[in-house]
Amino acid sequence: MESDNIAWLGHASFAINSGDTLVYIDPFRLDAGAKHADVVLVTHPHFDHFSVEDIKKVTGPDTEIFVPKDSVNAVSFGRVIGVEPNKDYSSHGVRFSTLPAYNTEKERMDFHPKANGWVGYILEANKMSIYHPGDTDNIGELERLNVDMALLPIGGTYTMDIDQAIAASKRIKAGAFVPMHYKAVLGKERAHEAEQKFLKSVRNSKLLKEAKEPYYSFD
């Protein structure tokens, strides 16, 4: 399975090239020269996932911006479309669906309540299906997944930690598993330990190197 068309921009931010369509998911701390998107997907309104400043950097005249329904009025530019869990969407020839994203662990229930209707995305791109979870715990809905690549948060505090992510990987059908959302949470040393544990314990696991300038050549 090819991952050459997926760029990890750090934290939970990704750029995905699907033919002639450029998709960003949760763009955050992007360079001022970042390429314009055709599609922007936002999982939930926390600052490190829903950065209006960064979305504006990549918004061109035809960009469509998909955000949870509670955040539609927070963006005053571009074409903004509200999304909700368990729905199918398409934009610029790219299809995607939504899955709920929420916390189940007692100590973080207030961070991402299920009632908020926040989402993860399953994106169909380049004959690949890619799951971006947003901020979530090891929820029952993960058992529905049958994808080519599953991105999993491993940082803990706000999302599942490394052990919970390992457990989640056993419930998901995926051709590859990639960790995300952990370096800023864990710090350098603990992040490295979590990466190594992920690689050792999760089948078909791999690391995506954080893209630097230029973010994504896709050549």
Image (tube, grey):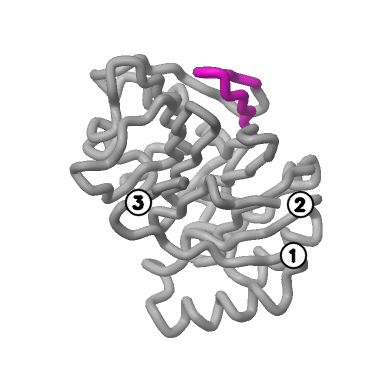
Local crowd size for mark 2, using a 10 Å CA cut-off: few (<14), some (14–19), many (≥20): many
> 35 left or right of 108?
left
Q: Which of disc 3 and disc 1 is earlier in sequence?
A: 1
Instruction: Give the number of the disc on residue 65.
Output: none
First of labels 2, 3 by sequence position: 2
Residue at image point 57% right, 24% down: 94
Rendered image: mark on residue 204 = 1
Where disc 1 sits, the SS reads loop
The mark closer to the camera, 1 or 3, is: 3
Q: Secondary structure at mark 2?
A: strand
Disc 1 + disc 2, Cβ < 8 Å = yes
Question: Gap between marks 1 and 2, in whole Å?
Answer: 8 Å
Q: For the point 31% across and 19% down, which residue is it?
A: 73
Which amino acid lies under the numbered mark 1 shown in the image of this protein? Asn
> Residue 47: horizontal and vertical position, in percent?
31, 45
Check whether the beta carbons of the residues at disc 1 and disc 3 lie within 8 A of each other. no
Q: Which residue is mark 2?
A: 174
Q: Residue 92 magenta-drawn? A: yes
Label at residue 215:
3
Q: What kind of residue is marked 2?
A: Ala
Q: Quadrant of residue 19?
A: top right
Q: Start and end of the magenta stretch?
A: 88-99
Helix, strand or loop at label 3? It is loop
